[in-house]
Amino acid sequence: MNSDFGPEYASAHDTSFVPKYQASCYCGAVRYEVCADPVDAKICHCLVCQRLHGAPMQWAAIFHKKDVRITAGIEHLRFYNSERDQHARILPCKVSCARCGTPIADEGRQMWLAFPSLFDFGPGREVPAAFRPTCHIFYGTHVVEICDDLPKWSGHKNHSQRL
């Protein structure tokens, strides 16, 4: 199934891929799994995330594409490139379910930015430490003051001014 999604992702036939976490959209039409912990997690306060998510911020866990395998619903994926205002898989882009509208991930050129709220962490839904945010990015455009000990960056982590 993944050969239709792209060679940079894990193949459905890769026997070395051992799922560690599973995620799905609200209606369950789109499902995927990952075989590793995220390389980082962040909270984004940029205006694009605010508007496209209808929320003051977006929480994302970042994975290498090779650690992601789509298991169902490739035909239900909808893509949107905000820079060009096009519903197309032009990277980077937003990925959502065409059936229920759930935002699934941000697909970057090399990374998959997954939304942790879609993962099934089992009974009690305890969020693993690897999914916990390490920073706030684009905090200069925040609309809700966040009082925590995480670093706050004006742009991307380690590539902008720390606020």
Image: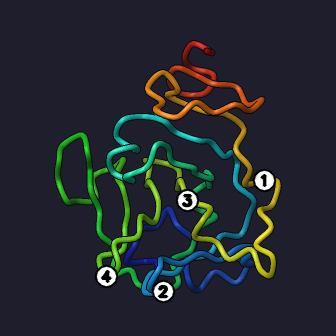
- Foreground mark, 4 or 1, reads 4
From the image, tell me which residue sits under label 2: 28
Secondary structure, mark 2, is loop
Secondary structure, mark 4, is loop
C-alpha distance separating marks 3 and 2: 16 Å
Instruction: Classify residue 1 by image quadrant.
Output: bottom left
Dot placed on the residue nearer the N-terminal end, 2 or 4: 2
C-alpha distance separating marks 4 and 1: 30 Å
| Residue pictured at 49% horizontal, 28% vertical | 138
Dot placed on the residue nearer the N-terminal end, 3 or 2: 2
- Three-letter code for the amino acid on which mark 1 is drawn: Ala
| Side of 129 where 3 appears, left or right | left
Give the image location of residue 141, x and y in percent. Answer: 43, 26
Dot placed on the residue nearer the N-terminal end, 4 or 3: 4
Crowd rating for badge 4 (residues with CA inside 10 Å; few <14, some 14–19, many 20+): some
Crowd rating for badge 1 (residues with CA inside 10 Å; few <14, some 14–19, many 20+): some
From the image, tell me which residue sits under label 4: 99
Dot placed on the residue nearer the N-terminal end, 3 or 1: 3
- Foreground mark, 4 or 3, reads 4
From the image, tell me which residue sits under label 3: 114
- Foreground mark, 3 or 2, reads 2
Give the image location of residue 114, x and y in percent. Answer: 55, 59
Compared with 154, 150 (above or below) is below
Q: Are marks 3 and 1 in contact (CB under 8 Å)?
A: no
In front here: 74 or 29? 29
| Side of 78 where 161 appears, left or right | right
Secondary structure, mark 1, is helix
- Three-letter code for the amino acid on which mark 3 is drawn: Ala
Dot placed on the residue nearer the N-terminal end, 1 or 2: 2
